[in-house]
Image (spheres, rainbow, N blue to C red):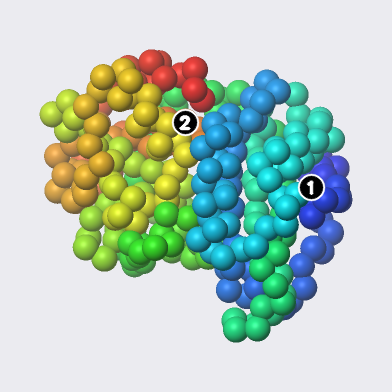
Amino acid sequence: MADSLFLFSDGQFLRTGKPLISPDNRSFRYGDGFFETMKWKSGELLLTKYHMERLFYSLEILKFKPPVFFTPSYIIEAVNALIKKNQHHHLARVRITVYRGDGGIYDHQNHFPHLLIQTWELNESNNRLNENGLELGIFSKAIKAADHFSMIKSNNYLPYVMAAIWAKEEKLNDAILLNQNGDIVDSTIANIFIVSNGIIKTPPITDGPVDGVMRKHIIDQLKKLEYEIEEKSISLEDLANASAVFLTNAIYGIRWVKKIGETHYSPDFIRAIFYKTASIT
């Protein structure tokens, strides 16, 4: 089935499985680029405004020079055309990859943003709160830098890759990364929130997490629902003393965490948040 799927590459629809880049490609060599993961549901892309804002900010901060035609409308139209060509009908995962072309670390050919779009069908379970809570661990072998570029979903994803391999070896659902101060950053595929004394807390962008689209949207929605939210550094002690923990990303929305190390968390508060915000995922 996967062999019949198409992808979009710089204006063309191609069969998957075909070579697309040369060995001299800067994204392959150095991770020179970034990606965006989106959810398509019943005919529309969700949270498009947030995704396009982050995508074009990433273009700017990574010094790409997009041509005039490279606009949010161009990208969205390409996504919708690919969704149709791949015959997705209800739910789909969309991955947009932007990368620089060939060259060495100092001798790039140009700053043109090459565009690759892929789509896959999603199971309906992605619209529901996970019944079995996630079990996570702390991955301490990699440190997530808190710098000018840490908020970007960079193609240089090595710390998260190694954390994901470790989590699988440990039979965990995901792993949490720390920054240079030993504070919580995020997980391999999601932003993290804790609940402590009724206050919802999440690490600030300055601590190094990816600037998650669902993170941003959940914060906005929960503030409208008059929950108290703080963007504040979270220590390992804070994590251990929390009453509830949940993860957010654009594909799954909200997922509740059952256990981190030897600490167990209740799902009750997370269920309340999920059903009050379910319409956005």
- Between 62 and 65, the one lying in front of the other is 65
For image coordinates 66% across by 68% down, the residue present is 111
The amino acid on which the numbered mark 1 sits, given as a three-letter code, is: Leu
Q: Is residue 32 above or below residue 196?
A: below
* In this picture, residue 277 sits left or right of residue 230: right
Could you say whether the residue bearing mark 1 is in a helix, strand or loop? Answer: strand
| Circle 1 residue | 7
Residue 116 shows in this picture = no
For image coordinates 75% across by 49% down, the residue present is 69
Residue 8 pos. (x, y %)? 79, 48
| Displayed quadrant of residue 268 | top left
Could you say whether the residue bearing mark 2 is in a helix, strand or loop? Answer: strand
* In this picture, residue 158 sits left or right of residue 86: left
For image coordinates 42% across by 54% down, the residue present is 151
Q: Earlier in the sequence, mark 1 or mark 2?
A: 1
Dot 2: within a 10 Å radius of its alpha carbon, few (fewer than 14), some, or many (20 or more) residues? many
| Displayed quadrant of residue 46 | top right
Residue 118 pos. (x, y %)? 72, 46
Residue 157 shows in this picture = yes
Mark 2 and mark 1 in contact (Cβ < 8 Å)? no
| Circle 2 residue | 253
* In this picture, residue 224 sits left or right of residue 201: right
Dot 1: within a 10 Å radius of its alpha carbon, few (fewer than 14), some, or many (20 or more) residues? many
The amino acid on which the numbered mark 2 sits, given as a three-letter code, is: Gly
Residue 166 pos. (x, y %)? 42, 59
| Displayed quadrant of residue 169 | bottom left
* In this picture, residue 8 sits left or right of residue 132: right
Residue 39 pos. (x, y %)? 60, 33
**Rendered-image quadrant of the N terminus:** top right
